[in-house]
Image: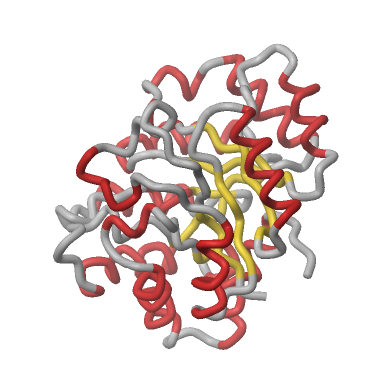
Amino acid sequence: MVVDSHQHFWIYHPEHHEWISDDMSVIQTDFLPHDLEPILKANGVDGCIAVQTAQTEEETEFLLHLANQYDCIKGVVGWVNLCDENVGERLSKYAKNKYFKGVRWILQDEGDAFFYDANFRNGLAQLAKLNLTYDILVYHHQLSHVLELVREFPSNKFVLDHIGKPAIKEGELINWSNAMQKLGMFPNVCVKLSGMVTEADWANWTEKDIVPFIDVVFGVFGANKIMFGSDWPVCLLASNYQNVKLLVDNYLKQLSAKERAMVLGGTACDFYSIHS
């Protein structure tokens, strides 16, 4: 099964999607499963993981509702307040839904101290008890805090979104690469080959700009810990679905059939417990 491990749905509203600034006008509209289904089919993708963009449980309910309606959605990474004293109860409720796979908290918007917050860390511990996953969304300069986090929680299933948002546009590899090498040593951490075109120069990126960063990811993690993700519709800021998938497909040509199958679906199915 070919699985897109990272994409989003929303009904656009300026107040609810304030992160979509005016220079992102191309995504200032609704994006729903009926928009994505023909795109998945045209690109040979069997299903997707719907990931939250709003930090509300209403967002989680919205995505689960869509998953019940559309076969293309194989799992949901929602939002639950991991800092709430009743977080275990909230997570247990959602864990009963077969589509609910895990949680994401948008750490890229948090200060350094939040990574060490006792309540947040208690929430992470509750995820592990229920075998729920955690998507890590950070900028490259926050990876040192991510290392401390994953070291503290060896029983959690972590995946790093968008290869840790390196400075692809500036071509700055070294510090990010050093952090990734350390992160790749943890057996409970996977990485999403996603969100790369939007870290590059939106209007002028080429494969040559991005391939050195993909080289690092494969050198550190290996195919069984890497999963393809489109980051649709955010990717539309810099490209289209076909070209994002082509970027990955072209790179995978040098790998074995087994490795390609892992990156294009096997890793995501294992990580998110998806059964065809």
Determine the residue located farthest toward the right in the rendered image. Answer: 96
Whether residue 120 sits left or right of residue 130 in the image: it is left
Whether residue 161 sits left or right of residue 265 in the image: it is left
Does residue 5 appear in this view? yes
Residue 18: % across, % down: 35, 30
| Residue 123 or residue 9, whichever sits in front | 9
Asked if 205 appears above or below 126 in the picture, the reply is below
Q: Quadrant of residue 94?
A: top right
Give me the residue at 66% from left, 64% from top. 72
Asked if 171 appears above or below 66 in the picture, the reply is below
| Residue 137 or residue 218, whichever sits in front | 137
Give me the residue at 39% from left, 75% from top. 242
Look at the image and tell me in which quarter the N terminus lies.
Answer: bottom right
| Residue 57 or residue 152, whichever sits in front | 57
Whether residue 243 sits left or right of residue 73 in the image: it is left
Residue 214: % across, % down: 36, 67
Q: What is the tally of numbered marks visible in this picture? A: 0
| Residue 144 or residue 242, whichever sits in front | 242
Give me the residue at 45% from left, 48% from top. 30
Give me the residue at 36% from left, 32% from top. 14
